[in-house]
Amino acid sequence: MIRSNPEELIRKNIARFVDNEIIPIAQELDNKGEFPRDIFKKLSKMGIFGIRYPRHRGGSGGNTTLFCIICEEISRGLLSVASIVAMQSLMGTNFLFHYGTGEMFEEFFLPAMRGEKIGCFCMTEPDAGSDLGAITTRATEVDDGYLINGMKTWVTDGPEASFYTVMCQTDPSKRLRGIGYFFIPRNLPGVSLSSRFQCLGTRTTPICEVAFKDVFIPKEYRLTPEGEGLNAFLKIIAEIRAMTAALALGLQRAAMADSIKYANERMASGKPIGKFQLVQSKIANMATNLEASKLMTYRATAMIDEGKEALKEATMAKYFATESACSASDECTRIFAGYGYSMEYTAQRYFRDARFLLNGGGTHEVLQCNIARWVGI
Amino acid sequence: MNIVVLIKQVPGNSDVKLDPKTGNLIREGIDAIINPDDLQALETAITLKETLGAKVTVLTMGPPQAIDALSEAIGMGADGAILLSDRAFAGADTWATSFTLGKAIQRIGKFDLILAGRQAIDGDTAQVGPQVAECLDLPQVTYVFDIETVENGYVRVKRRLEDGYERIQCSLPALLTIIGGPVKPRYPEVASLLSACHAKAPIQVWNAADIGVTTADVGMSGSFTQVVKTFAPKFERHGELLEGSAVEVVHNLIERLKQNKLI
């Protein structure tokens, strides 16, 4: 029986989309800094947002590995578009898919898969990031529902979203054990947004603060049952970190490809700069880090797809691949030298965008502590 | 309506090597894409399916990795696909290819329209579509960029000319070769791509016996033409600096342009 390999087939087709539809306008999109509606619509037509969800429930029938392959390829074109895809396919819709009622599924999840509605995830607060036990956004039980009060920040896609999955504290005395996820449509009274953040990189990705003041939601909008919030978080965090590693892989590939092309073209002292050993050293390091990142990332996704515990592997992959992306984009600007400092070339964009990856899914300062603890410190 | 679309996998870049013995392109192990005109034919067929209702079957001849082109076709919306793959088909010229495709279409049986790309970007012959029509004794219209109507046993199309277009009505069944039109080929849906990878996907693989041909009729044995020699053209540029006064240099330059028949 001759059949195509699904991973190669998906990668090849997404790569074609990226080469034809994203890369030619990536600089323009980044300069404009607007939400890429046209590309978002095209990606929804391809069923990209449903890649992690089963086909019989509105998804495309893939898995985490395929999802990360897609993230990697799109990130190779423009990291900010890939981050929007990641939010819509994973954090923004995951809890709605698993815990939402049939009515919520019809009204919000399926339109999100079709790209008609945008979902996003509100976790970080002004005074609580990696320290999730310290979140103060409060869900207070009242007759027939909950009142939500608090403030979330660094909400990726917040300005464009139709609905939010919000991590709230239900009982401050329980700290992490008291957290839960709540579904909040944007149009409810009491929901307000800050203006869009001006950021260093990923300029098409809109980010803002979202405030909730006495927002009343019905009981069914509590997504995770009491006591299950932390478990739900632990279930998704490995996938979030593997996805971030995949985004970093795409950025590494873009930075390395442009560096190689430039090093082979740019002449200095009568020969291409790629003939100089110090430039070769930079390229060799990029290639080696890329290969290691790839192996770590897809080992983690394979474990997730097999239903294995993969938090350690995904955390290491996120940490290593992101640091490698920062290093590759830095070296890329050095290989481009003066042109690396020019806004007309891609190197500066890779350099700025790479910083986006450092914090999402946990800062590296926190992740290193986790890794050290897991190996016996 | 039943539509058969003929597609071909072609090298996706110019880094292609030739077999020094046979002179044929070495297709194994290179990045391959669906030939652009064939992709347009496929888009045309799927648009017809959506607007008029049709069953779209895609047919290709090639090595096992050509299965990817068929999976992509399923991803775009084709209902079924057939890969003609047999060592006996290797080395076919355009005639042997057309004959083999024609025999496969006869085995498919029911069809109203056969759509093919105008030409493939690797061989650039534009012969296979028209020859398949001859094999099957069908009317054909080439260089079609728009299908206006399909009704009452006729298809009405626009055919591109150098300085305009012809509007042609043709009886069915017929073969049309397609060129790029106003509609850009769609990208495949990921769910359909994944379905195409399943064992139960509607993709069949046929060999020479399946289409009732002997090895003498197909592949290199069935070809009327043989590649005697192939070579990659070498493009070399030489720069020359003209010296002297401005007047001398201009005269010199004009003389050289005349010698090279450039003015």
Image: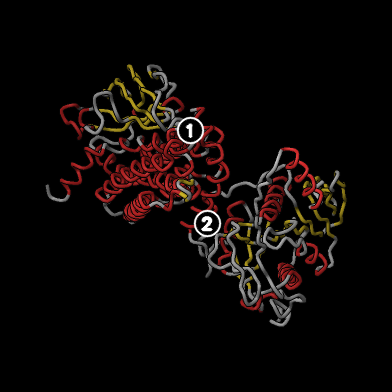
User: How many marks overall?
Assistant: 2
Q: Distance between the residues labelled 2 and 1?
A: 27 Å
Q: Residues within 10 Å of mark 1 (few under 14, many from 20)?
A: few
Counting from the top left corner in percent of width and height, residue B25 is at 63, 68
Q: Residues within 10 Å of mark 2 (few under 14, many from 20)?
A: some
Q: Can residue A242 be seen in this view?
A: yes
Q: Which of A196 and A121 is in front in this view?
A: A196
Q: Which of A323 and A112 is in front in this view?
A: A323
Q: Is residue A347 above or below residue B176?
A: above
Chain where mark 1 sits: A
Q: Is residue A52 visible?
A: no
Q: Which residue is drawn at 71% across and 79% down?
A: B213
Q: Is residue A307 left or right of residue A36?
A: left
Counting from the top left corner in percent of width and height, residue B69 is at 60, 59
SS for tag 2? Answer: helix
Q: Which residue is drawn at 39% across and 34% down?
A: A352
Q: Which residue is drawn at 41% across and 37% down?
A: A87
Which residue type carries mark 2?
Answer: Ser
Counting from the top left corner in percent of width and height, residue B75 is at 58, 53
SS for tag 1? Answer: helix
In the picture, residue A197 is in which quadrant? top left
Task: Please state which of the two labelled residues, at mark 2 or mark 1, is closer to the viewer.
Answer: 2
Counting from the top left corner in percent of width and height, residue A178 is at 21, 32
- Is there CB contact under 8 Å for labels 2 and 1? no
Which residue type carries mark 1?
Answer: Glu
Q: Mark 2 points at which residue?
A: B195
Q: Mark 1 points at which residue?
A: A107
Q: Which residue lies furthest to the left in this view?
A: A377
Residue A122 — which label? none
Chain where mark 2 sits: B
